Amino acid sequence: MSETVLVINAGSSSIKYQLVDVDTREALASGIVERIGEAVSPLTHKAAGAKHTVEAAVPDHTTGLRAVLKLFAEYGPDLAGVGLVGVGHRVVQGADVYTAATIITPQVISAIEELAPLAPLHNPANLQGVRAAMAAFPELPQVAVFDTAFHATLPPAAFTYAIPPEVARSLRVRRYGFHGTSHQYVSRETARAMGRAAEEVNIITIHIGSGCSMAAVRAGRSVETTMGLTPLEGLVMGSRCGDIDPAIVFHLVREGGYTINQVDAMLNKESGLLGMCGSLDVRDIHKAIAEGDDAARLALEVFTHRLRHYIGGYCAQLGRVDAIAFTAGIGENDPITRALALRGLEGFGIEVDAAANQAARGAARISPDGARTEVWVMPTNEEYEIAHQAAELIDALEPTAR
């Protein structure tokens, strides 16, 4: 029987889940519980090619997971018959404490709580999912897979900010990076598609969707990434500003009269593509550009300018770049953004075949034959990566510890 892992990504008012067959990489079922804590919560469950939507009162995550189990019982597959070996949880912030997938114990829960100030919107919500799953599956191992873990291999020169060291140490201020499961999966799968081992190649992974980040991956290890202490740093994103002069914050407070909380909300939720042109959907932005919208045109130029800036910098950091891989919603589906991001980089050995780029669906090489650096579109699969890491860790346990 194949091994399956139930992957849970708990937000403050939602539970996303996927039942993954680790051997076949197939999602046997997936779904979401939304609006937890409101009067009525919509639940969506997909299995066996069918989509089922119901509504229920879901006051908390424990009730939400019970509702999920009811959906499995009613619409399948039968969790008792699919070889379920454990539950894998996405946890956003593991800091420098957790550098790999970890079996969840009371001590691990306490540590994740202690790290909550570094991810106040995410770690507490992730733990709600953990506690709910432990109540629902007390006999199964629970595994935390951290967004930050893949970037634990960053060298000190890459993760250190130039602030007083005693301040950095006391408040745990350093670059952590995020989207680690995506960068790890995409870099490994790109190497596989090239017919190479991950340890043999240097790859720049470009995860661009609503959230955006890049990583420089040398021989399978992350050595640089764009997000920092929080996911706000780096690339321009859907609603996040990415890199700005830090003194802009002081200016907004002193001269604009904004509170710190207002600035936080502005830079995280009201900036990026959304702030510049009113939309974070690149399909809308392309349509607006075609209709002569100068704000949309500038927004796309700023977005792709920042991408080129980091691609060039990562070429310098890696020295030799064997491949560039685009992934996530924009990276996998928007040939215009891919082409603009790489425009003018022929001197780095980076070229795009226009026809291949336009035709790319799923995993596809879009660089011409003989190009020094291969360019790939590589769909990400963060749920599989979480399931894979969880299953590997569970398989390594002593039988009595399972």
Image (cartoon, rainbow, N blue to C red):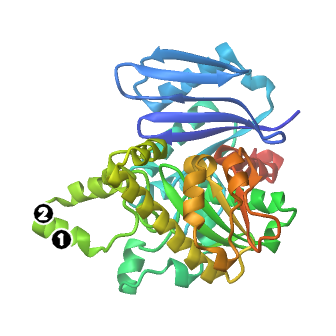
Say which mark, if any, is on residue 256: 2
Please tell me which residue lies in front, 268 or 361: 361
Report which residue position mark 1 lands on.
251
Up-down relation of residue 7 to residue 77 (above or below): below
Residue 115 in percent (x, y) is at 45, 60
> Residue at the spot x=34%, y=70% of the render?
244
Q: Residue at x 56, y 78 (%)?
A: 313
Residue 266, how many percent across, how many down?
27, 54
**Residue 380 in sight from this viewpoint:** no
Q: Label 2's element?
A: helix
- Name which residue lies at 41% across and 35% down: 13
Q: Is residue 17 left or right of residue 210?
A: right
**In this view, 172 is above or below 273:** below
Name the quadrant containing residue 164. Answer: bottom left
Q: Earlier in the sequence, mark 2 or mark 1?
A: 1
Q: Quadrant of residue 223?
A: bottom right
> From where the camera sits, is residue 367 visible?
yes
In the displayed structure, 27 sits above or below 100; it is above
Position of the C terminus, as image quadrant, is top right
Q: What is the quadrant of the N terminus in the image?
A: top right
Would you say 130 lies left or right of 4 here?
left
Contact between labelled residues 1 and 2, with CB atoms less than 8 Å apart: yes
The spot of residue 27 in percent (x, y) is 72, 34
Question: What is the spatial separation of the Cα atoms under label 2 and label 1, in whole angstroms?
Answer: 7 Å
